[in-house]
Amino acid sequence: MSRPAKTEILIIDDSPENLKLLHGFLSSKGYEVRTALNGALGIQSARTKSPDLILLDINMPEIDGLEVCRRLKKDTELKEIPVIFISALDETLDVVNALKTGGADYITKPFKIEEVEARIETHLKIRNLQIEVQKYNQHLQSLVDERTVQLREANRKLQSLDKLKSDFLGMISHELRTPLNGVLGISELLLMNNEDSSLENAYHKSRRRIERLVDQVGTLSRVETEQSIESYQLTSYRSLWDGALKLIEPDNRASLSDSPPDFPESIEVDCCPDLLTQAIATFIRVSILVAKEPSVKVQHRAEENRVITTFELSQLFSNEAELHDFFEIESIVRQSTPAEKLGIDPIVAAKVVSSLDGKVYFTNTEPFSLILEIKTANG
C-alpha cells in the first residue's frame, strides 16, 4: 500500500539493526523514514522538521525513551505527534509509565513487522482525524467570529437608528409644541366672538386631543431614551401600583374594585419607575373603558419571577384573534372601542412593559380579563 510522500516517520533507536529493519520495511510501504541513534539526535531531528509519527525505543543510553517523550510533549510544536514505544520490556508498570509520559501505544520486542505496520496505520488515521477535527473547529470558529462581527455591526446600526428615531420623536414633540400653541391661541381669539357653543366644544375637544398626542410623542421619545439600564432602579410593585392609582381620575378610580396586592413590599421591579407607573395607569384606563360592567375587579399575585395583575371584564368586546394586536399602532379593534380616546398611550405602555421582559394581553377564558405580567427582580 503506497503512502503520500509527505507521510514521515521518525525512528529513534540505539540499535542499528532495528533501525535498518524498520527503515527498510516502512520505506517499502511508501513512507518517508528518518532515523536517529539516540534520544538527543531524535529530539533535534523532530524539531528540525516535524514527523507525522515517531517510533521510540525506551532503553537507550544517556536520554532514555521516556525522557525523550516527556520533552517532546512539552514542546508546543511537537506535543500532538503520536509516539509509539518499542521495547523488550513487557511488565505492566513499564507499559503504564510509557503511556503516562504521553505515548500513544506500546509494542514489545521481538516485534512482528505486520503488527508495527498495523499500529502505525491506526495512529496515523487517528492523527489525521484529529487534524481534520481541528481544522473544522477552526473553520467553525472563524464563522462564529465573522458572524459576531456582523452582529456587532448590525447592533451598532440598530442602536444608531434607534437613537435617530428617538431624536426625531423628541424633535417632533418639541417643534410641534411652539407653532401649535400659536395656532391654538389664535383659534381661541377667533372663538371669543363666536356664539356657537357646539363649535367651541368641538374646538376644545380637538385641542385636548392634539395636545395629548404631542405629549404622547414626547413620552414615546422618553421610552426610547430612558429605558436604559442606567435609568433603572429597584422599585416595589406595590408602590408602582399605588402611584398609578393616583394618576387615575376620581370618577374612573371609583370604577375599580381593587384587591390590595397580597404579596410583600419586597416584591420589586427593576425599571424606570415614572414610565412604568404611567404604563400601569394606562392599562387601568383601558380596562375601565372596555369593560361592559361599571366595575372592574382587579387582582394581583406573584408567581416565580413575575407579578401578575388581572383586570376582570364582564365579556370580551371582540374575539381573541382580533385582540392579539390591540396594543399595536395599527389595531382596528382598539380604534373601534372607547379606548380609542387614549390615542397611542396603550401602545407606549405596552412598549414599556415589553422592554422589561413583560407582556400585556387579553384572555378569552372566563373570567374574561386583561392580563399584565411584569418580570420581577426577586425571581
Image (cartoon, rainbow, N blue to C red):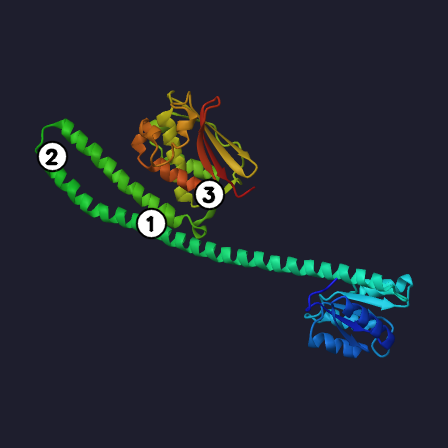
Where in the figure is residue 106, as x and y percent of width and height?
84, 63
- Identify which amino acid the numbered label 2 is placed on: Leu
- Identify which amino acid the numbered label 3 is placed on: Leu
The residue pinned by badge 2 equals 191
Q: Which mark is residue 356?
A: 3
Where in the figure is residue 330, as x and y percent of width and height?
33, 35
> Residue 204 vs residue 1: left or right?
left
Q: Residues within 10 Å of mark 2 (few under 14, many from 20)?
A: some
The residue pinned by badge 1 equals 165
Mark nearer the viewer, 2 or 1: 1
Kind of element beneath mark 2: helix
Q: Is residue 122 visible?
A: yes
- Precedes in sequence: disc 2 or disc 1: 1
Q: CA distance from mark 3 to mark 1?
A: 20 Å
Residue 354 appears in which quarter of the rendering? top left
Residue 16 appears in which quarter of the rendering? bottom right
Q: Residue at x 45, y 45 (%)?
A: 271
> Residue 121 vs residue 14: left or right?
left
- Precedes in sequence: disc 3 or disc 1: 1
Q: Residues within 10 Å of mark 1 (few under 14, many from 20)?
A: some
Kind of element beneath mark 3: loop
Q: Residue at x 18, y 30 (%)?
A: 202
